[in-house]
Amino acid sequence: MDTAGRLIVSNFGASSITIYSNAATTNGNVVPAATISGAGTSLGSPTQMILNNATTTGDLHVADGNSAAVLVFANIGSANGNVAPTRNISGSNTGLARSGSGTGPFTATGIALDTTR
């Protein structure tokens, strides 16, 4: 949950991130306030996420096992639609690549953030 009370959910099967307003009181079949999805997002199968509220824009770090990457979306409070990540950690030097020419087990499935360094 972010500082504005929005719940941010990774959707592994739908390759998307959904954001729900008023998470403390929302109940039932609720339409998301925002959905991040589409080819431009680089989302393959997002798993765990960390929200860095220490930044002024609210950076969302997303572990994506299918893409073998950590995707970072800045200003998550206003993100919606087919938005590209602001930056990413991916490539052969990262140790996140899937084995078996990309068909092996997912690698980037967990994430933690140390904001003190």
Image (cartoon, helix red, strand yellow):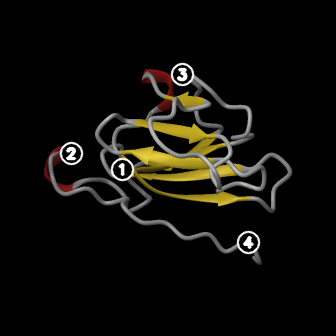
Identify the disc placed on residue 77. Answer: none
- Badge 3 density bin: few <14, some 14–19, many ≥20, Cα 10 Å: some
Which label's residue is closer to the chain start, 1 or 4? 1
Indicate whether 29 appears above or below 89: above
From mark 3 to mark 4, how far is it between C-alphas? 28 Å
Going by the numbered disc 1, the residue's amino acid type is Ala
Q: Position of residue 86 (x, y in %)?
A: 65, 38
Q: Quadrant of the N terminus?
A: bottom right
From mark 1 to mark 3, how far is it between C-alphas? 19 Å
Q: In the image, what residue occupies the spot 46% across and 41% down? A: 28
Indicate whether 98 appears above or below 35: below
Q: Tell me if 107 is positioned left or right of 26 in this view.
A: left
Residue at image mark 4: 115
Residue situated furthest bottom in the rendering: 116
Which label's residue is closer to the chain start, 1 or 3? 1
The mark total stands at 4
Q: Position of residue 51 (x, y in %)?
A: 65, 57
